[in-house]
Amino acid sequence: MKRCDLAQCQAVCCYDGVYIDPGEEKQIRALVRENKAFFKFLPTVFLTGAKWGGMKGLKTATRPFVYRNRPAHFADTRCVFAFDDGKCSFQVLAVEHGKHPWAYKPTACWLHPLRLSIRGLVPPPTKKSEDPDKLEGYPGYVSFTPCGEHAPDDPPWQETLAEEVVWAKKTGILPKS
């Protein structure tokens, strides 16, 4: 796998916003409230309820954005927290505050293209037909993002995504041993 290249993919993974974990809502609302000048670009509604595959949850809102190249089943929208250049405002703010770049990002964002299961971290599937987000009428998500695609000449995912594994252990979502 290759690491994300924003210049190439334009953060197409952000096209639909991101579902957030229950505890992340409070953190996001506090960040926006405490950093009003930084987040002045946000719309009034930046978190919204949504439904996906029979599950309901809270996710970041989206705004119109036209990608140069995107999978046909991805909409021309982008998470409201993403800048036009693809950079994540949570990550930019964390760095400005002297924190780890992923300190403020929702877990699903910094973990992408990995997934968390009861067995630990799950890499993206090697075949699009095995995409975990495949639903009737929707061919999938993670395997359609450039950083979720496998290529024979690329390093293995464990090497490419080693930082994510370390951060997952440091934050406690994975056991440290």
Image (cartoon, helix red, strand yellow):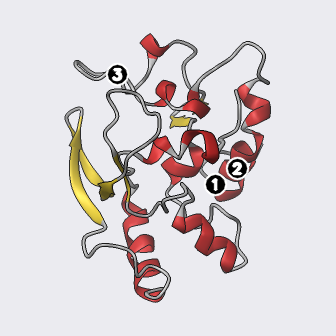
Quadrant of residue 123 within the rendered picture: top right
| x and y percentages locating residue 125 in the rendered image | 54, 19
| x and y percentages locating residue 6 in the rendered image | 61, 47
Secondary element at image label 1: loop
Which residue is painted at 52% across and 46% down in the image?
A: 11
Labels 3 and 2: the sequence-earlier one: 3
Q: Are marks 2 and 1 in contact (CB under 8 Å)?
A: yes
Residue at mark 3: 134
> Which kind of residue does numbered mark 2 sit on?
Lys
For the residue pair 56 and 34, the one nearer the viewer reads as 34
Residue at mark 1: 172
Rate crowding at label 3 as few (under 14), some (14 to 19) or many (20 or more) other CA atoms within 10 Å.
some
- Per the rendering, the mark at residue 24 is none
Q: Nearer the viewer, mark 1 or mark 3?
A: 3
Q: Nearer the viewer, mark 3 or mark 2?
A: 3
Residue at mark 2: 169
